[in-house]
Structures are given as structure tokens and as C-alpha cells.
Image (cartoon, rainbow, N blue to C red):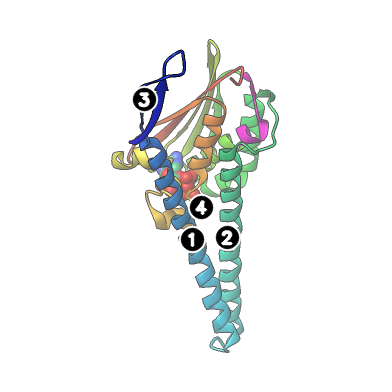
Amino acid sequence: HRFFVSPAQDERGQLDGIMVFIVDITSEKRAEQVRRDFAANVSHELKTPLTSINGFAEMIETGMLQSSDDIRASCARIHREGSRLIRLIDDIIRLSEIESGSAEEQVAPCSLREIVDEAIASTESPAREKGIKISVSGEDVMLYGRRPMLYELVYNLLDNAIKYNVPKGSVTLSLSQKEERALLQVSDTGIGVPPEHLERIFERFYRVDKSRSKQTGGTGLGLSIVKHIVEYHHGTITLTSKEGEGTTFTVVLPKNGK
Ligand code: ADP
């Protein structure tokens, strides 16, 4: 708690006593802690790919690698880690844009079905590679929102539903509306989230299985961006999950965008 003391005056301006204000700064403190943790995590996340880029470059430079196959393999690693760095930086910038409210997108009427179809089209290749079947159910819902953000929201959930699915699994996107709200559910038949991780899954850089996330090219920021987008639109996001059976994310957004 923080205390403020101030003199109190009566209606004639005479000193009448003192006023003590007690301000709860718990949430302020927590926000500061989150910022500090984020800065530490960012440094770590950026340093890991850079360290390996440096290592491979040094091996090539000092002639430690002789065969052209080895050299090519190292270049491929450098390339992969470089792409990872770009994705990370893009996600960090996007997150801070949404968080600070400096994202430029304007509110406009959007068709949820159109956005869902677009997201499905852009995840077609990973879905096909893994043999994942994607289906859509329900009627289109129109809502006011920032279209690029809503697309990102659906894309990230769908991308995860494919990434954390089992081969030949399936994903269902259901659209519906209830009174003034639009509802979107993304269900998968994937690996699920163990109950002890459910609460932390929207935190920045939080991953249930670090190596799996890295293998699939994840930055650990996707769900955190999703959550920020939902909150930016005054909506809510929840999930239910069963290990080894699958996960369902439910997004509820006000149709008027307010
Ligand atoms: P990542 O880049 O690691 O995918 P996200 O922020 O998108 O980061 O997700 C955080 C973590 O939540 C993931 O690492 C994964 O462990 C878990 N996760 C997200 N979506 C799903 C899902 N549909 N099924 C199972 N686990 C999931």
C-alpha cells in the first residue's frame, strides 16, 4: 500500500484536520513484475538463436567444417535460427503495439465466416502435411472489430490446433451468436493441456513443452497475442482441455465491438 497525507480545510479555508489516502498498489506492483520478467525473458529468447548462429558461423569461418555437406547443414541451421529471430521480433513488436493501443487498424463490420475461411486457407499446407481434417459449423456472424486482429486471433488458434494435434486428427471451428455476442470455438483432437498448465498458458513465453514448441517453430507468444486481441475487443477467452483427447478454446466477442 502507498499512503498520501494531505491537509483538510473547512469551507472558510481554515485547517480542519488531515486526510490520509491509502492506495492499493498491488496491481501496479504486479504489472511492474510482469514487465521485468518480460524483459528478462525477451533477452533470453533472443540470445538463444543468436548464440547458435554465432557458433555455426564461427565453425565455418575457422575452417572447422571441411565437407561441403557439413557447411551446407550449418548454413541451414543459421537460416532456421535467423527466421526464428525474425518471427520472435515480429511477435514482440505486435504484442507491444496491441498492448499500447498504438495498432492502427480501424473498427469495421467483419464477417467471422470470411475470416475463418481465410485462416483455413493459409494453414492448408501444414494441415495437409499432417493429414488434419478441418471443418466449420454454424452460420456466419457479423461483428464490429479490427479485421486484421480478428484474423490473427483465428489464425493463431487454428495454427495451434494443427501444431498440437495428432497426425490425422481433426479441428472444428464453430460459429454462433447469442444476443449481442459472437461466439467462436476452436476444438482439436490433439495432445491436450495438462490441468496444472491451464492457468498459465496465456502468459508470454509460457510453453507446456519447450522443445516441442521450438520444434514446431513457436515463439511462445501466440496465445498471449490472442488474449490481448480478445481483451482489446472487450471479449473473453477460455479453454477446456483433456490430456490425450483434445482442447477447445471459446472466444466470446461483443458484436458491436464495445
Ligand atoms: P507456441 O509458440 O509455443 O505455440 P503459444 O502462446 O501459441 O506458443 O502457446 C503456448 C503453449 O500452449 C504452447 O507451447 C503449447 O504448449 C500450449 N498450447 C497452445 N495451444 C494448444 C492446443 N490447441 N493444444 C495443446 N496445447 C496447446
Secondary element type, mark 1 = helix
Report which residue position mark 3 lands on. 19
Asked if ligand 1 lies within 8 A of label 2, the reply is: no
Asked if disc 4 is less than 8 Å from ligand 1, the answer is: yes
Q: Measure how far apart labels 4 and 3 are at the Cα level.
A: 50 Å
Q: Which residue is mark 2?
A: 85
Q: Is residue 178 above or below residue 81?
A: above
Q: Earlier in the sequence, mark 1 or mark 4?
A: 1
The kind of secondary structure element at disc 2 is: helix
- Residue 14 percent coordinates (x, y): 42, 19
Residue type at mark 2?
Leu
Residue 192, image x, y percentages: 37, 40
- Disc 4 marks which residue? 219
- Dot 2: few (<14), some (14–19), or many (≥20) neighbours within 10 Å? some
Quadrant of the rendered structure where residue 211 is? bottom left
Assign ligand 1 to one image quadrant.
top left
Question: Disc 1 marks which residue?
Answer: 43
